[in-house]
Image (cartoon, rainbow, N blue to C red):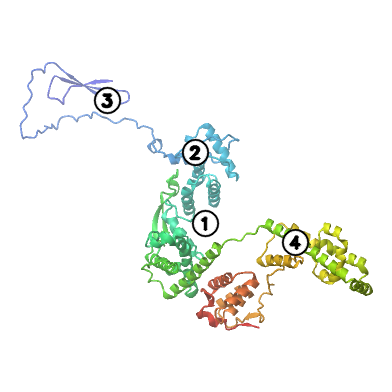
Amino acid sequence: MKNDKPNNDNHIDSIRHTTHVTDQGIRFAEFELAGDEQDIPLQDKRPNHQEQEIVNPNAPAKNPLIVKPQQPLDMNWGEDFRYVTKEQQFVQKARELAWHVEDEAPFVAFKSYWPTYDQMASDQFKWYFYWREEVRSGRYPDTDLSYLFVYFYELIHGVGWSDPLQGYALMEQAWTAYRKRYAKLDTYLREWLYDFMIVHGLDMPIWETYQRFPRVLSAELKEKEWKRRFSLQPVELTWELLLDLLDYDVEKSRFYQEKGRKDLERYAPKVIALVDSYWAKMKGQRLIDRFQPRPRQVKRHLFRSAVYDHGLYGRTVVLTVVSLSEHAPLRSYITGLVRLTENKLRELRGFKGRLRGSEAVEPEVEEIITRYLKKEIQEQMEAERKQSLPEVQIDTGKLRRLQRESDQVRDMLLTEEAGQQEVEAENSQPAAEIVTDAGASSGYGGPAAINRRTGASSKGHSSPKSAAKNPEVFQAVMDFDAIIYEETKVPEEARNEAKEQEALVVTEKEETAIAASEDEGTALAAPESKEPSVPAAGKSSEGAVVWNMDGLDQEWQELGERLNLIHLEVLHALKSGPNRTQLQRIAEQAGSMPALLLDEINEAAMDTVGDLLIDGESIADDYIDMLETLKSE
């Protein structure tokens, strides 16, 4: 449509203005300039004056150049132009494929930094959904780490489980199955499981325990682990966990670097547990109760480093944390205990120099630590001394050879002695006849009877060749020494069994007995056991040891129930002071060692009374009165 109208808005008569209107209601303006305006001079502008437009009130209104469309566009801007994040796309597709299963497919490698379904090829897609069904069924085929992350992302967003406890269990089981191959899983799954507990309100125990805190572990999990370990009975602190609670770098100590590393790493955590048990017994208040810091609130980001849609549970959550590691009084006290431990170890090991800063420790606590470390170091030094002794090894082959040579020497001596006796018998024939007649009248039955009576013994003490050459020799020998020989003979079965024994242990006494048998020409008797017979438990040389517990406190009655009768004998022997001889005798009868028996008593005392009952090899002066009713009946 074309609309021509005169130009009333211009002061130049040669300009023609034409307006075009299309079918959609859009208007276009068209201007035509005539050619008569070439020599028309331009108006001069007045300087320093603002030009004002002359408005004629009777003139018609101007039409705008841009007009609005007559009909509105049919468009939903909120839906058609909404931005969908990568995480939201993943969650939407994960819910669509929540129960999708593929048939058995071959494994295909898959490696991606932020793995999702969109990054999988068709064969990778088939393997993942076959593998996922295997994992849900409790079978864990070998696979790549990227497949595992996709599976964990699904569990985080609620895909594959109907109850939060089920989702937590599935995540933990998959972590356990694959963590040995992929150590990187520990970095993420510790934190993701903790976040899963938070968003679903689960009160689950900490499954993972730490020997050393990982560098990437969050502060919230560190504090939670410290609180758990301080709440155990006894306190379970490792050297690595203890280092973060100290106000000084103990590993830079000269004692630690030169000779005290093993001692400090071994005994410092045990000293903390010892002091905690002492305060619990004496004051009814443990370290975590005595130095309980105030809780504080911290902001935690959920599911870090995961493909996570924060629209599901939010980006962050506010937690209430009890910060033990940053509580100054607790750190100061534990630092003082470790400094005191190092000073005592320096003293016991003969190391010069002492550290300052242990003055905050109470005198009674210092005494307990001193007695404990003294006992432990003495026992350790004694064990090291025993290990340094040379080990005695017996050559069983050489021992059997010596035994054979001894048998040969004995047979030779018996043959020589038999020859001498034969000569004497020939010189004193009447005496032999009298003896023979007397033997016959007394029931021995003459030479034949003697042969029958001594046949077995002759086989056991002479070689077959010598018996074949001199058959009369044995008659003469047995006539003179028949009764004595029968009393000292060694049965053939026992002798053969001793020769065939594979492992023989010979002491110095046995070797002496072998040498004596070679000189005297007697048979080698079986060694007798020198171990003393163990008497009935609780029986001493005087009688049974009884401890009357009436009137004692509950902890002492518990101690009496923990100790057996051998322990009571030890306490009875030490009532009047150190008695190493009696202590050694009791230990030998019990088949143990004195140090072990004393350790068992002190361990039971620490668990019940809260202190060491025996100091060195004597009963502590503070508790000697408690043993007045310990008597031997």
Q: Farthest front residue? A: 427
Find disc 4 in the rendering and name its residue: 409
Q: Nearer the viewer, residue 494 or 556?
A: 494
- How far is mark 4 from mark 1, CA to CA? 80 Å
Amino acid at pointer 1: Met
Q: Picture quarter containing residue 75? A: top left
* Residue 389 image offset from top left, x and y in percent: 56, 63
Mark 1, secondary structure of its residue: loop
Amino acid at pointer 2: Lys
* Residue 83 image offset from top left, x and y in percent: 39, 38
Find disc 1 in the rendering and name its residue: 204
In terms of sequence position, does the residue under pointer 4 or pointer 3 come before the other? 3
Q: In the displayed structure, would residue 356 be above or below residue 26?
A: below
In terms of sequence position, does the residue under pointer 4 or pointer 2 come before the other? 2
Q: Nearer the viewer, residue 220 or 195?
A: 220
- How far is mark 3 from mark 1, CA to CA? 72 Å
